[in-house]
Image (tube, rainbow, N blue to C red):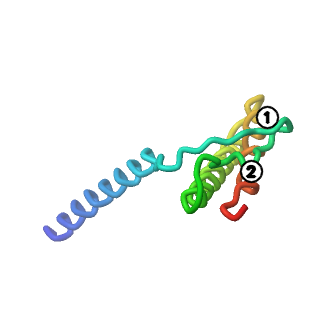
Amino acid sequence: MKRIICVTVVMWAWNNAIAEYRTELKNDAPDYYAYSYEVSSNGKIIEDSVCSEYSGPAWKGCRRYAQWEFSVKCWERGYDLRHTTGKVRQRIKKERDFFCDAKRRVTPLS
């Protein structure tokens, strides 16, 4: 009986520590690649403007990070779109289309 209680307490503490660590990682996203981008007149991202302040391997890493960030924002807007109603949907749909298009356009190879 003591063993079951001990294991339960240890597992509870372990799960809380892991949950706290995950929250900490999520809130402290790496800001090593601080990048900027430009938007054309038709509302699409200009591929060459993303990470233009970097060069070489840092440029490639920045582009990978930007592509990852755009895909996360695309997914989040898609999730929000499914769970909202009304006038907010149009704004969210426009943002989702922008980030999903940016995710496809920005690649580390171009």
Of 56 and 80, nearer the camera is 56
Label number found at residue 90: 1
- Residue 107 in percent (x, y) is at 69, 60
Tag 1, which secondary structure?
helix
Quarter of image, res 4: bottom left
Which residue ends up furthest to the front in the rendered image?
55
Of 7 and 103, nearer the camera is 103
Amino acid type at circle 1 is Gln
**Quick check: 56 left or right of 41?**
left
Query: Which residue does the image show at 69% across and 64% down from the upper left?
Result: 109
- Residue 96 in percent (x, y) is at 73, 44
Query: Which residue does the image show at 86% across and 38% down from the upper left?
Result: 42
Query: Which residue does the image show at 81% across and 39% down from the upper left?
Result: 40
Position of 14 relative to 92 (above/below): below
**Quick check: 98 left or right of 51?**
right
Which residue ends up furthest to the top in the rendered image?
87
Amino acid type at circle 2 is Glu
- Residue 11 in percent (x, y) is at 27, 63
Which residue ends up furthest to the left in the rendered image?
2
In this figure, which residue is indicated by the disc labeled 2?
47
Q: Looking at the figure, which quarter contains the C terminus?
A: bottom right
Position of 32 relative to 12 (above/below): above
Image marks 2 and 1: residues in contact by CB distance under 8 Å: no
Quarter of image, res 90: top right
Query: Which residue does the image show at 44% across and 44% down from the upper left?
Result: 27
Badge 2 crowding class, 10 Å Cα cut-off, few under 14, some 14 to 19, many 20 or more, is: some
Q: CA distance from mark 2 to mark 1?
A: 25 Å
Front disc: 2 or 1: 2
